[in-house]
């Protein structure tokens, strides 16, 4: 892994979604991303009372706002060779419509990528590449 100052992680979430779906999308992206980049999760912390707090990510994760078009464009860019070393996790309408993972696997296998409507995407990689994709995007507030 590069030094922390050379890596970046962002999430881009469709600002037009209801608040609950935005929160759910962010949680799912974060959990999945954590599986793929466990090295950026810090060690557990012990507070002044002696209570343990599980380690959290050691770098900031700005949540940026986009819409279904900007997220679609990002996803398409991330499929190109220029960004094959960037980790990207997406969450779409196909995934959100399923209650069990086996149903998702079945549904997604029958849907072309261009038919996915992305709710959000998490991106992790070299800071320069992540900034190239998202550097001008505003924060979701």
Image (cartoon, rainbow, N blue to C red):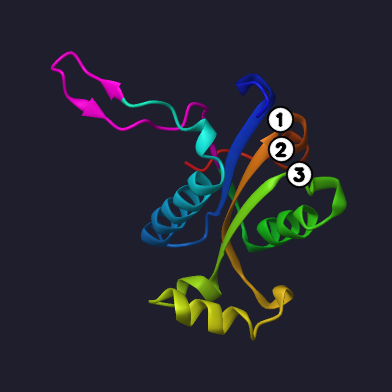
Q: Residue at x 77, y 30 (%)?
A: 128
Q: Is residue 43 left or right of residue 34?
A: left
- Could you say where residue 137 lies in the image, as x and y percent from the top left? 66, 40
Q: Residue at x 36, y 30 (%)?
A: 55
- Quarter of the image with the N terminus is top right
- Could you say where residue 90 lies in the image, as x and y percent from the top left? 59, 59
Q: Can residue 136 be seen at all in this image of the molecule?
A: no
Answer few, some or many: residues within 10 Å of disc 2's Cα (few below 14, many 20 plus, some between 14 and 19): some
Viewer-proximal residue, 24 or 87? 87
Q: Secondary structure at mark 2?
A: helix
Q: Secondary structure at mark 1?
A: helix
Q: Is residue 101 left or right of residue 74?
A: left
Q: Is residue 76 left or right of residue 23?
A: right
Q: Which residue is mark 2?
A: 130
Q: Is residue 48 magenta?
A: yes
Tell me if residue 50 comes above or below residue 29 in the rendering. Answer: above
In which quadrant of the rendered view does residue 109 lie? bottom right
Q: Which residue is mark 3?
A: 85
Tell me the magenta residue range: 45-63
Q: CA distance from mark 1 to mark 3?
A: 12 Å
Q: Secondary structure at mark 3?
A: loop
Q: Residue at x 64, y 20 (%)?
A: 5
Tell me if residue 120 comes above or below residue 38 in the rendering. Answer: below
Which mark sits nearer the N-terminus, 1 or 3?
3
Viewer-proximal residue, 21 or 76? 76
Answer few, some or many: residues within 10 Å of disc 3's Cα (few below 14, many 20 plus, some between 14 and 19): few
Q: Are marks 2 and 1 in contact (CB under 8 Å)?
A: yes
SS majority, magenta: loop
Could you say which disc has been placed on residue 127 in the image?
1
Q: Is residue 111 magenta?
A: no
């Amino acid at each position: 892994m590069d030094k922390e100052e050379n890596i970046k992680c962002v999430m881009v979430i469709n600002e037009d979604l209801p608040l609950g779906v935005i929160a759910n999308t962010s949680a799912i992206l974060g959990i999945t991303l954590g599986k793929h980049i466990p090295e950026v999760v810090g060690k557990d912390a012990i507070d002044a009372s002696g209570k343990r707090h599980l380690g959290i990510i050691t770098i900031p994760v700005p949540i940026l706002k986009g819409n279904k078009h900007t997220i679609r464009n990002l996803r398409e860019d991330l499929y190109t060779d220029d960004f094959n070393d960037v980790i990207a996790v997406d969450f779409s309408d196909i995934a959100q419509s399923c209650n069990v993972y086996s149903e998702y696997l079945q549904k997604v296998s029958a849907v072309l990528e261009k038919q996915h409507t992305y709710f959000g995407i998490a991106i992790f990689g070299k800071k320069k590449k992540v900034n190239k994709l998202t550097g001008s995007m505003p924060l979701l507030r």
